[in-house]
Image (tube, rainbow, N blue to C red):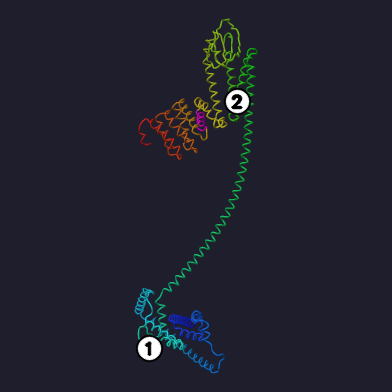
Amino acid sequence: MEAVGGAAEERWASLCNCVVNFLLEEKYHLTALELLQELQEDGRHAQALRLRSFFSDPAFFPPDLVARASSSPPGADPQSLLEEKIAAEEKLALTEYDLRLAKEDLTCLKLELQKQQESSPDNTIDASAHEGFNQQDQRDVKISALGPLKDNERKDLNCAVKEYLLLAGYRLAAMTFIEEVLDQDLDVWTNSSACVPDALRRYYYQYLSSTTEAAEEKISILRENEALKKDSERLYAEKDSLMKTCELANNQVAALRKSLDAAHMDIKEKEKMVRDLKQSLDVHRKELNDCRAEITALKMHIEGTQSSKQMPVGDTDGFSTQLNANSMGEAAALINEHENLKGTESITIKLVSAAALTEDTRKDHKNTESTIEGSPGSQAPLSCSTAGGGGYGTSGEDDSGTDTSPEGISVNGTQHGAGNSQGNSGSISVYVSEDKVNTEIVESPSIHKSSYKMALETIKIVSDALPKIVPYVLINHREELLPLIICAIERHPDSDVRDSLTHTLFNLIKRPDGQQRRIIMDACVELATSVGEMRTETELLPQCWEQINHQYEERRLLVAQSCGELAIYVRPEIRDSLILSIVQQLVEDSATVVREAATHNLALLLPLFPNMDKYYKV
């Protein structure tokens, strides 16, 4: 019952608000004022708020006029009090009557609701269809197109309001409303579709059932509110995640800064270590050079001592002394020259050259002694002369007493006349008697064999020393080693050593410029000319193949420029197979200069093809 009473109270308040809005919109101010008084007397202050705010507005009702109109003599007489008492009793009776009417209305509504529930579905469908049709019509008609109220519409509304005021017990307000509406007779309501019992309430219910805009608007507002709440929650979650991410990022930044500081410290320590190692390397290199110079001096001293011991006392002393003096003088001149160059690598090379020169002089001296001592028969007079007026000689008589004519033999075994021995600067000649010529001719193959063996040993020594010497030579001076490298590659008997030297030739300079590449290519061409087709294919081309994918474009450029020039020194079937494959791979290189050089050398290679079958594959 309390729920039913609350619903009825809510409906009554809605109807009251509709009446208040109607009276104010139609400017029935007297009726509205009377209704305000009755609402206040009835204790319905919530419904009287709109009217109270309207009549208290100074824009419509100035305070001075209100004060003047409401002025009354002070005090109250008993007659007025009696009248008020009588009015209160009448109002109480009216209230009881209204309560009885409300209960009756509630009972009628319950019965009507029960009848509607028990009614047939057809009637419900017809009624709903009729209501839907009216609702669709009302929705189609815009408010702006309705226009002002018509006379019959206004009369229907006025009659419905008068009926509501009477049913609600506001008789004074109803009477004031009838007096205020002068142009219409509200006592006579023309029989029409709008003339129904409790018309205003029915109008209200029909309005609620026929308009869905308010409900839809409320639902949309609720949905929007829920969406906004979800968005707010999502934003808060994103904010929390961003805060966590920011915190993690800050921690990572701090860790990275620490690692960066540690890396900087490590780099500084490594740089310091590198400086220390460089200093120690310089010190050790200087010590090494000093040791090499000392070793060279000791070798020269030992060789001089051995030569003085091997030669006979007397005539041989001058010869040995002169040889050692010449060797020492040349070594000293070379050392002085390289002290002026002030290069550690150059000093090393020249010291090795001085030692080799001294060693060659010593070997030539021994060969001369062995040639002299190995001659059978009588001992012929010997004479060793040098250009520049310094002559050292050894003479003896033949055991057989036969007259001899001098015959000149140089250190390397080549025969010279006596006159030529004076014209060759720095040569050492041995003069023997005429009867020893046949013996020397017979022994010349052994001398040539000894010379070849000595030359082969020299090649081996140079080949073993070159890979160790190259790193200590300045880059700008390494091309001076090319004659030695080419000679060693050409004459060394071991193929593994030749491959190592060929690798050294191609890797002589880490990143050669144009001039240095030209020098290396010329050396390769000269080597290919000397060794022939087979060795060019087996020794030079594999080195080119290994350099195709080198990390430095200068080395790949060297290969691209070398292939075209080496093509004429290989067999025709190698040109259109291996060399063509190398050039085609270099044409697809990432560096532009390498592609240009490969294209140029491909143009040089095409005319050398033995047939035209490969032209279509290029």
Residue 607 x %, y %: 38, 31
Q: Earlier in the sequence, mark 2 or mark 1?
A: 1
Residue 366 to residue 345: above or below: above
Q: Which of 341/499 is in front? A: 341
Residue 584 x %, y %: 42, 36
Q: Which of 308/586 is in front? A: 586
Residue range of the region highlighted in magenta in the rendering: 495-508
The quarter of the image holding the C terminus is top left
Report the residue marked by disc 1: 188
Q: Nearer the viewer, mark 2 or mark 1?
A: 1
User: Helix or strand or loop: what does disc 2 sit on?
Assistant: helix
**Left or right of residue 566, residue 392 in this image:** right
Residue 54 to residue 357: above or below: below
Residue 326 to residue 518: above or below: above
Residue 96 x %, y %: 48, 89
Q: Which residue does the image show at 58% across and 25% down from the upper left?
A: 353
Q: Which residue does the image show at 54% across and 61% down from the upper left?
A: 240
Q: Is residue 507 magenta?
A: yes
Report the residue marked by disc 2: 337
Main SS of the magenta part reads: helix
